[in-house]
Amino acid sequence: MSKLDSSVSAIPAKPATLSRASTADEVLYGSDDSHLDFRGSVLVEPGRVVLSTVVQIHNARGRAYFGIVRLVHPRLVRMMLTHAARKLSR
């Protein structure tokens, strides 16, 4: 491997979150990593927004990471959605 090749391989191959697909009403996103894979959906329906996530844990590091995220994530998402709704309603 040349010096250039080794420097290129050190760059992550994928961003942390990828938009996988979208329609006018829904965005699907996700990421795969060595410790866990996740997929999410943001669906806009009349009068509400529906968020869904699915996580596949691969190892102990994934279990530890998700254990923390599982506690904090619901509150953060609610706060972000509330903030967005207030900002959009102005």
Image (cartoon, helix red, strand yellow):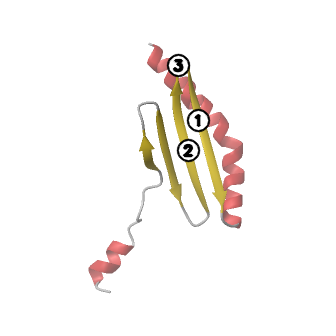
What percent of the width, then of the height, locates residue 76? 61, 36
Q: Secondary structure at mark 1?
A: strand
Amino acid type at mark 2:
Gly
Residue 51, horizontal then vertical, whole percent: 59, 35
Residue at the image position 33 percent from the left and 75 percent from the top: 7
Q: Which residue is mark 2?
A: 40
Mark 3 Cα within 10 Å, few/some/many (few <14, many 20+)? Answer: few
For discs 3 and 1, the disc positioned in front in the rendered view: 3
Label 2 neighbour load within 10 Å: few <14, some 14-19, many 20+: some
Q: Earlier in the sequence, mark 2 or mark 3?
A: 2
As measured in the structure, the alpha-carbon distance from the residue carrying label 2 to the one carrying label 3 is 20 Å
Is residue 44 found left or right of 35 in the rendered image? left
Quadrant in the rendering for residue 58: bottom right
4 relative to 85, above or below: below
Q: Which residue is mark 3?
A: 46
Where on the picture, by quarter, is residue 64? bottom right
- How many discs mark residues in the rendered view? 3
- Give the percent coordinates (x, y) of residue 24: 41, 31
N-terminal-most mark, 3 or 1: 3
Provide the secondary structure element on which disc 3 rests: loop
Amino acid type, mark 1: Leu
Q: Residue 15, image x and y in percent?
A: 43, 56
Image quarter of the N terminus:
bottom left
Does the CB distance between marks 3 and 1 fall below 8 Å? no
| Mark 2: secondary structure | strand
Residue at label 1?
51
